[in-house]
Image (cartoon, grey):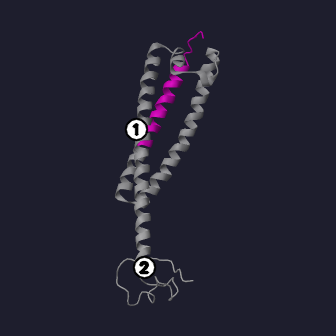
């Protein structure tokens, strides 16, 4: 691969990486705010953050199309397919200052995206924990329902079936009469 400097690709890549960084910072902020809302058990705020994160991910889709176009442009200049273009290959088309700027921004972007991934994983774990608690609570509330409203009076768990029984836990047993 013989690299011929392209004076337009450096500024285009730098501009693209700057836009990626802005988006990644916005995404990190949203994910952090979502984690705070989860910890506060603020359902409305959690849902708001989910909608905002989805919007940011849609904007990132546009950035990804731009990235694909830049890689195709670099691939054409280098005589290689776009999917084979690495950061090193890309920087070979730039002047030294742009190449250094691209490397620095790329490293920062990788760090930000890794942090977004970590925080998102924490949020998912917190949500699973909250949902498990709610599931447990719902089961506990269902098990202590003393109204008998949804059971026939003759059923052992109904209020009429429990008349005279202690307030202990309900035990279900099989009636094995032949």
Quadrant assignment, res 163: bottom left
Question: Mark 2 or mark 1, which is nearer to you?
Answer: 2
Residue, far front:
178
Q: Say above or below: 137 vs 60.
A: below
Q: Look at 51% across and 17% down and name the residue there.
A: 88
Residue for badge 2:
145
**Foreground pick, 127 / 156:** 156
Quadrant (top left/top right/bottom left/bottom right) for the N terminus = top right
**Foreground pick, 163 / 147:** 163
Q: Which residues are magenta?
A: 1-28
Residue for badge 1:
115
Instruction: Tell whether label 1 touches label 2 (CB within 8 Å).
Output: no
Q: Look at 51% across and 88% down and name the residue there.
A: 154
Q: Say above or below: 15 vs 149.
A: above
Label 2 to label 1: alpha-carbon separation: 45 Å
Q: Secondary structure beneath disc 1?
A: helix
Residue 26 visible in image: no
Crowdedness near tag 1: few (<14), some (14–19) or many (≥20) residues, C-alpha within 10 Å:
some
**Foreground pick, 15 / 89:** 89
Where is residue 81 shown, x and y percent of the image? Answer: 64, 21
Q: Look at 42% across and 79% down and name the residue there.
A: 145
Q: Secondary structure beneath disc 2?
A: loop
Residue, far top:
2
Crowdedness near tag 2: few (<14), some (14–19) or many (≥20) residues, C-alpha within 10 Å:
few
Quadrant assignment, res 171: bottom left
The secondary structure making up most of the magenta span is helix
Where is residue 59 shown, x and y percent of the image? Answer: 54, 41
Residue 158 visible in image: yes
| Magenta-span inclusion, residue 123 | no
| Magenta-span inclusion, residue 5 | yes
Quadrant (top left/top right/bottom left/bottom right) for the C terminus = bottom right
């Amino acid at each position: 691969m013989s690299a011929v400097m392209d004076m337009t690709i450096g500024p285009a890549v730098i501009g693209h990486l700057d836009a990626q960084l802005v988006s990644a910072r916005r995404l990190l902020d949203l994910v952090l705010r979502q984690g705070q809302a989860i910890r506060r058990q603020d359902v409305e705020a959690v849902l708001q953050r989910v909608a905002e994160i989805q919007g940011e991910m849609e904007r990132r889709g546009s950035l990804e199309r731009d990235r694909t176009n830049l890689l195709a442009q670099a691939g054409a200049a280098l005589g290689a397919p776009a999917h084979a273009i690495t950061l090193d290959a890309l920087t070979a088309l730039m002047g030294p200052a742009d190449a250094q700027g691209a490397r620095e921004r790329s490293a920062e972007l990788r760090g930000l995206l890794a942090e977004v991934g970590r925080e998102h994983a924490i949020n998912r774990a917190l949500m699973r924990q909250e949902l498990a608690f709610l599931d447990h609570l719902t089961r506990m509330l269902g098990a202590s329902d003393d109204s008998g409203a949804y059971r026939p009076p003759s059923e052992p768990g109904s209020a009429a079936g429990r008349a005279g029984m202690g307030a202990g836990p309900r035990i279900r047993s099989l009636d094995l009469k032949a």
